[in-house]
Image (cartoon, rainbow, N blue to C red):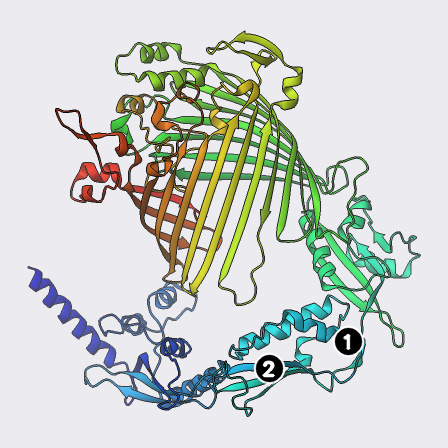
Amino acid sequence: MRNSVLGILVFLVTLSSCSVNKYIPEGQSLYVGSKVKVQADSITKPNVSGLASELEAIVKPPPNKTLLGFPWKVWWWYFIGEPKDEGGLRSWFRNKLGEEPKFATQRVADINASNMVSHLDNEAYYRSKATGTLVRSKKEKRRTAIYQFDAYVMPRYVMNEINYVVRDSSLFNRDLILAKQKTLLKKGEPPRLDVISTERSRIDLELKGKGYYFFNPDYLIIKVDSTIGKRDSTLAPQQVNIFLEVKPQTAQTSLKQYFINKIYVNTGSQESLLADTTAAREPLRRGLNIKDPGNLYKRRIFYDAIGFRRGNMYTNTMHNVSLQRLVNLQNFKFVKNQFDLVPRSDSALLDVRYDLEPLKKKALQTTLSASTKSNNLGGSQIDVTWRNRNTFRGAEMLSINAFFGFDVQLGGNKSVNPNKIGNEYIRYGARADLSFPRFLIPFVRIRPEKSQVLPKTVLSIAYENRVQRGFFTTTSIRGDWSYLWRKNSEVEHTLTPIALNFIQPTNVNWERLDDIIFSANTNPIDLRRYLKLVETEYFIAGSNYTVSYRPTPRPFSKNQFAMTGGIDYGGNILSLFAKRAKSDTTGIYAKEFLSVPVFQYVKLDGDLRYYRTITPGVKWASRLLLGAIRPYGNAKNMTTPQFKQYFGGGSTGIRAFRARALGPGAYTPDTASIRLFGYQNFADIRMEFNTELRLKFTKIINGAVFMDAGNIWSFGSPQRAEYDSSAIISSDFIKQIAVGGGIGLRLDFSYLVFRLDLATPFRKPWYTKEIKSETPEGDVTYKNPWVFNEVNFRNKAWRRENLILNIAVGLPF
């Protein structure tokens, strides 16, 4: 049967091939590919590794696509035929399924060979040669051809001296010489064309930052002297000297520093702007003339957003910053900016104009989302958001959001938790945010000309109910007062001096809970933890601070990294107003505020990410997560609230384990607990490391190979943590690290990334406490936590337990 199918396939391919040939004009051949052979100079023997694929990538046009040598897309092109209507269905099928034939010619081969020589020159392989030949298929039935290119490569030149040439000591020339301090041209590196072009653009930006508004990178010329021979014995014999200078024909207006004269702002139509040019202008304040026909905005927002002041030197930094601030106000449909030279002989003054079109004041948005999770939960959420821009005429933004969502149990987890008690969720609530584009602090103001981004003050209040169906409901009321600011694009600060949160469990299913309490199958440890969860109220008054650092990578750098750190603490101020209440189980009298225990804590978090571009299609990404929360003082014997703790596993964590199924430490809940509550493992400490190799297959289809490691742990005593001793962090915590890995498929649609990650555990930390064998003498052997020997893809039970499919939107980090 298999041989018959193969024979039919070969027959069809042969038949189809013949059917393509009859459409091809006599003497023509379809272009189906190219080959590049690189030969290094036999005397100097330069390193040419990877150069063949680099040259092959610049061959144009792309070849006709083939399958087993059969140009199937061209066949479709001819088979469908010429459509009568360009917008019809036949035309759509022809363009989608087929492609227009590309015929191979010697002229195209010669053009590509010439382009290869230019590319080698641009990469500093001077005096190299390349030839192209059209090679037709030897099979008569295949009227196809390829291009064969032979490149003879001479040694690569490197830079010896980099000179900035100036003719005098004028102010411009002094600034040009200063720009050399951060040059991208480095001794010992080849003088590549793209590096030279980037160097010219860098100098242009640096000069514009010093007031040279009319300067252009095309005014710079870089000359290469390749006749110097070997000047530095530490370098190769092939050396060049670089000379950078300003073209002699450059106009003097481009070499002059410019200063700001007047600043005009118009928030109306173009007609109102033209009328304003002839009407008497309002008095200038801080150099700004503001035309606001509808009297929509307070003048302060423009004083803050526009960093230019009359008499200040023009800089491209303030130019971009002012535009960015106006756009980030989210009050304008577009922001148009222009600079006009003041019409006066030898003028060095610029007038600045901003034309702004306001957005609609109010907007309503509805968002419907769906999700699936690795713990076999799937669901949906609908959000309705109402926004009121420019609420108090100061570019404030009022946002009110109401939401309703649910998660239901899917797939194999039904066999573990058939009753689905506490393992399905309904969530609903509302949130209101009011943001101000300034600091709301008495006597504190920023200087717009010094800070790159306007600060923001955000007041938030939120109410949420999270219903664990058949179990209980968690009600959360939260209020925050936050400040966000940054002085440049790399460092951002967020300070929340006031963060209030009240958590209360309600609507407890006591009948079901009694069944759990008196069940012989219930684990006492898990029971205590869940009883604490449904009985304890929390009122937390805290503060938190977060700083993120995302440095801008240097041009041509293959490395990029980002860091985020934060501290969250609370309960100190609230404890001053609290009163002693009844003692807890340890006999210590805890303080209470409004009959709710005061929780004192400090929490630290860190996130370090590193990205390295190996090739244009291969990228290596890694992330290190560290976090810990430590109760103290009044709360040192209290269990940490679940919403302040960490969990392991899931689509953005250790993907080989289901969300909230990992840890703490070597602890694992028994089957009865999972049947009752699902996966609900939380703890006080998180350590996690993720790394993955990201592969770009096509413009849309990408892949990944990844590995994750880490775990969560608890502080203090088992009684406080509500786990046994295996969950408490100790000196041998490294033995409780979980490891997993897998492969991923990503569909990149530019506006979103749809991700599928299939993972399996490599190391299970709870095996370190599971007994494998025991001798009569009492010698115990525990299981090996590395579980490669258990892999069995044929076993359905193993696949259900160990193959974890993570479906998500967006990259994991």
The residue that mark 2 highlights is 161
Question: 505 or 398, which is in the foreground?
Answer: 505
* Visible residue check, residue 807: yes
Tell me what residue is drawn at x 63 percent, y 23 percent: 572
The spot of residue 128 in percent (x, y) is 43, 89
Decide: few, some or many residues near mark 2? Use Cα within 10 Å; few <14, some 14-19, many ≥20: some
Q: Please tell me whether mark 2 sits on a helix, a strand or a loop.
A: strand
Which quadrant of the figure has residue 397?
top right
Would residue 486 be found to the left or right of residue 581 on screen?
A: right
Return the mark for residue 172: 1
Would residue 164 be found to the left or right of residue 96 on screen?
A: right
Q: Please tell me whether mark 1 sits on a helix, a strand or a loop.
A: helix
The spot of residue 36 in percent (x, y) is 34, 82
Amino acid at circle 2: Glu
Q: Earlier in the sequence, mark 1 or mark 2?
A: 2
Residue found farthest to the bottom: 227
